[in-house]
Amino acid sequence: MITTITFNPSIDKHYILDDLIKGEVTRAKKVQNTAGGKGLNVSRVIRLLGESVTATGFLGGNSGGFIVDKLSELKINNRFIKVKGETRSCLAIITKDLAQTEILEPGPTIQEDEMAEWVKAYDEILEDSSIICASGSLPRGLSVSTYGEIIKKANIKGAKFLLDTSGEALKKGIESKPYFIKPNIDELKAITGESINSDNDVLKIIDKIHDKGIKLVMVSLGANGSIAGFNGKKYRIYVPKIKAVNPVGSGDSMVAGIAVALERGYNIEDVLAFASATGTANAMEQQTGYVNINNVNKVKEEIRIELI
Ligand code: TA6
């Protein structure tokens, strides 16, 4: 079973504007509210790819209630812990030049007893999980080493832990050897402190990450595809040019593609192609964290993978 963890979920409010002018009143042409936060985008896409998924983390207040309703609509098993604080909202403002401006609220402060209740649920869920996807920022109240601690528990149980976060939480998480990480270039620079000026620099850093015990690394290059390392081999993945409508959530969709492909036992090249096609297909949709399976299959045929 695939389990997703979203410690800091959000109602993703997606605004389409002609232009965003600071200090002026602007009326949104279109507004879309979705159950978001990286892990919930991952959960929704896993369902759209045809696999079942259990979602866990923290939800609170009326915003939490909105998300619970969305989970049941999507038939996502809900193992969230109810908290006193209010689940946050995150704004994604897309203007007609396709620039995207995101404003992310910090979210509620999680209390010690709420975290203790979650750890109990996690220990139970781990018994049936082959793959754990943990995505997004840590809310206030959770230690920066939280991902590192729960990765260790997953490794003991033999579950593959896919980690998609950034900054100190990623740095600490890496120390516990998750199965998979998907840093973008900025996150790679932040965690290594190294400058990255070429694909060759990326390849050297991937080797260092493998030396830390992480099996699968995908470095996202956005519309230029990605560079991946697995089992001592390196891959350059090229994605077809598409008409991007809303790129927000493409990284989350790629993680969903990795989880589904691993769950189905695909070989590494099919894992990389399926995940890249899923991330690309998300950008073709107005909704954040959404794919049309026909687009995924069509794009997958156009993905090119080169052994480096
Ligand atoms: O990746 C897009 C997104 O999931 C947005 O939908 C918004 O929820 C944001 O990321 C949350 O990011 P964070 O790192 O705070 O979990």
Image: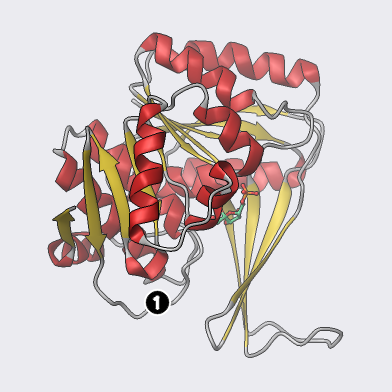
Does mark 1's beta carbon lie closer than 8 Å to ligand 1?
Answer: no
Viewer-side residue, 269 vs 90: 269
236 left or right, relative to 206:
left
The N terminus sits in image quarter: top left
Q: Look at 41% across and 59% down and name the residue there.
A: 290
26 left or right, relative to 161:
right
94 left or right, relative to 217:
right
Q: Is residue 293 visible?
A: no
* Rendered location of residue 119, percent (x, y): 61, 15
Q: Look at 68% across and 58% down and name the residue there.
A: 90
* Rendered location of residue 286, percent (x, y): 46, 72
Viewer-side residue, 279 vs 69: 279
Q: Look at 63% across and 43% down and name the residue there.
A: 167
* Rendered location of residue 143, percent (x, y): 72, 26
Tag 1 secondary structure: loop
* Rendered location of residue 32, percent (x, y): 59, 68
For the residue marked with disc 1, what is the amino acid?
A: Ala
Viewer-side residue, 180 vs 251: 180
Q: Quadrant of residue 170?
A: top right
275 left or right, relative to 110:
left
* Above or below, 157 relative to 169: above
The residue that mark 1 highlights is: 244
Q: Quadrant of residue 81?
A: top right
Crowdedness of circle 1 by 10 Å Cα count: few (<14), some, many (20+)? some
Q: Is residue 308 visible?
A: yes
* Above or below, 19 relative to 291: below
Q: Quadrant of residue 3?
A: top left
Q: Look at 50% across and 30% down and name the residue there.
A: 174
